[in-house]
Image: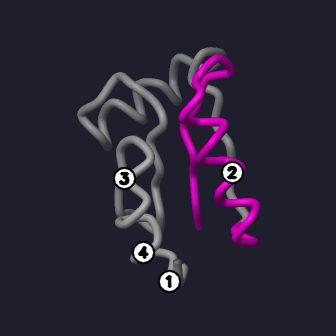
Amino acid sequence: MIKLYTTPTCVYCKTLKGYLKTNGKDFEEIDVSKDEKRLQEMIKISGQMGVPVLDINGEIVTGFDKAKIDNLLNIQS
């Protein structure tokens, strides 16, 4: 299960969404600008207030860390 915490104005979020889609990865997008409870959830799991935050089966990735994302999702570059 992949959860992606985003905001509508985040350029890196848009890039990351495109990257996941291009690689055929389904994900749940969570807009933290509209959901205070989910924002607090994101802060709790990541220690960050900034987006994107990616939760891949409990492994947390902050920002668009391509190498870490590729490793966790077995994406061959």
> If you read the primary sequence from the N terminus, does the residue marked by circle 3 or circle 4 appear first?
3
Magenta-colored span:
1-25
Identity of the residue drawn at 75% across and 64% down = 22
| Secondary structure found at label 1 | loop
Disc 1: which residue: 74
Please say whether residue 2 is one of the residues in the magenta stretch: yes
> If you read the primary sequence from the N terminus, does the residue marked by circle 4 or circle 2 appear first?
2
Contact (Cβ within 8 Å) of mark 1 with mark 3? no
Q: Position of residue 67 (x, y in %)?
A: 37, 66
Contact (Cβ within 8 Å) of mark 3 with mark 4? yes
- Is 24 placed left or right of 37 in the picture? right
The total number of labels drawn is 4
Q: Distance of mark 4 from mark 2, alpha carbons?
A: 16 Å
Q: Nearer the viewer, mark 4 or mark 2?
A: 4
Disc 3: which residue: 61
Amino acid type for the residue under numbered disc 4: Leu
Contact (Cβ within 8 Å) of mark 1 with mark 4? yes
| Secondary structure found at label 4 | helix
Q: Nearer the viewer, residue 63 or 48?
A: 63
Q: Distance of mark 3 from mark 4, alpha carbons?
A: 10 Å
| Secondary structure found at label 3 | strand
